[in-house]
Image (cartoon, rainbow, N blue to C red):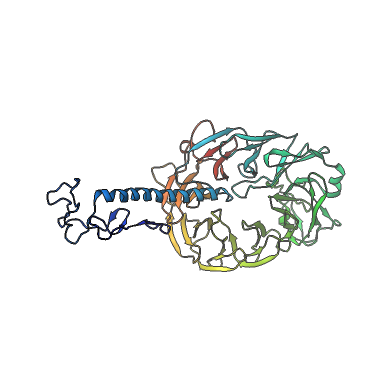
Amino acid sequence: MAREPDEGAAYVFDLVDDDAAEPGVLRGAARAGGTDGQEPADGRPGADGTDPGGAGAWAGGPAPSGGQVVTWRRAAPVLALLAVALGTGLAVDGARDAARMERMRDVPGGVADLSAPLDETWSWQGKVDLGEGMTDVAVLGGDLVFESEGELVALDPATGEESWTVDLGGGPECGPTVSPVWDDPRTPALVCLQGRGRETEVVVVRPGGATSAPRLLPAADAARYGQPHTGPDGTVLRARRVGPVLPLGEDVRCDESGDCDGQIVDGRDLVLRAEDAVTGEERWSVTVPFRSTEAAQCTSTFSAAWGSSENRIHLRGQFATEAFGARVRADLVNVEGCGVQAAVTSSGVLLGSRLEPGSSVVGRLDSGGYLGMTWDDVTRTLLYDADGATTGEVRGYVITPKSTDEAGPATLLAIDETGRRLSAHEADGTARWDIALQSGGQEFLAQVGETAVITTGAGTVRGLDLATGEERWTWDGSDPDVTAEGGYFGTAYVVQSFTDGEVVLLLAEGNGSVARGMVALDAGTGEVVWDEAGGGPGTTLDPHDGDVVRQGVTGDLVAVDGHLMEVGSVGVRGLG
């Protein structure tokens, strides 16, 4: 009879005979790898001259002193049972791995398997339009989606085949699309503006390439509500300054180059409006109040017409008190301009309107809430729930994991550089632990199982116990192999990280090289599972010529449905 062990324990088998008095039966327990039965006194079966493999070996004869007897006939089923049970153990481990891989497909940014070095599995060649980072992409209905020379292209992450394409009109701009290095690219819909000017049209693209009929945007709405901009959740955003134009204070002075100093005390508020892209009906409208701000905050601004991309800031270097712009994500709109700075959720909840302009930022949390950081006098972070209500405040600035297996409650790490402390908190701000801050430049690379993986500016990666903050392991990647063309850290830094629930993959760049280095660490022990140094050939990605090892990773990585992909300006390829 086999008793199923706890996870990680040995399989135990109880061998019980039907007749306790019958000779030649082994009683007791046997464990994989050996038995508790004793051998003859000299340690050799058949030392009395009998054939160890013959029918008479220990069969019905006297058992060795203190031993028990067993026949090969009776032992054969036991050995067969052992073989089956050991196979069952492997099957259980395989089932657990399969379940973990399947679960990681549903985790945002999760990868099914990182246990072996990456190879190219497929490639797609074509232009990927540039954004704020190397590329702007979206994840829509399980496909990787991006703009490419007047088309919206969707790729199947498993095969690289085009799932669908949508032809766009002249001067198209679709959003929200983001750099996967900085933001979560998942979105329920993409809004595309085309034919900019008096004949601007809008379409909404949803999973599977389902596209709404084009709607012509009334020219009068631009004067009434402001210029159109792609918005979240199938909306078109518009914004404009409201109120009387006020003169600048006498203490504001600007030189011929446009550099200004002094304090701008009064200015005009900003009204932000979201309308349904298909019907044109208003979804919500909020007013971002003007607050006193330094004149220097009004010299380098967004382009007056929102900018040509929701993810790029155009710095003019001129004094512009009316200019503003926005960064749009799937669930948050950040607006910024002279005297105005705030964030609005996709449902129209205003956040951060009381934070100091120019020294604050509002971001999203993977747990469903938001955070607002300010660093005017004392660095602190306000925490909001999904409805925008304040739930807590943390001293220092908060960092969230670049990747997670979502196996436990969300963890926030707060860095108080003034007090030299590193603390962990629940999503609502409840303190969990507090330890000394070893160095600056901390990055929260991953939350996997019961481990928080962090790194410092000095290039050391540490695994901390999520419950206590106790250090479990360290890995020092600051000294690259002198025989290699590059390394991991030191002058490099971690750009992205991914996990499969057991392994943490770190993508680092630096050392003046184009190709990025990769190292895969066991999240539980910190041991190197595999690695590939950076500093490879300084060529751009050509999906039809070269593999990961020879070319190196030169683009950004993105994970969709458990599949890892590299996105560059001239193509996309699958890695696995």
Taking the spot 67% from the left edge, 33% from the top edge, the residue there is 149
Above or below, comparing residue 514 to residue 61 in the picture: above
Front residue of 130/403: it is 403
Front residue of 480/447: it is 447
Residue 404 falls in image quadrant: bottom right
Can residue 492 be seen in the rendering of this structure?
no
**In the image: residue 237, left or right of residue 86:** right
**In the image: residue 233, left or right of residue 464:** right
**In the image: residue 232, left or right of residue 62:** right
x, y percentage for residue 158? 56, 39
x, y percentage for residue 494? 52, 50
Furthest residue in direction left, as rendered: 49
Residue 292 falls in image quadrant: bottom right
Can residue 468 be seen in the rendering of this structure?
yes
x, y percentage for residue 256? 74, 49
Q: Quadrant of the N terminus?
A: bottom left
Above or below, comparing residue 565 to residue 526 in the picture: above
Front residue of 540/192: it is 192
The number of discs equals: 0
Front residue of 350/115: it is 115
**In the image: residue 409, left or right of residue 338:** left
x, y percentage for residue 23? 22, 57
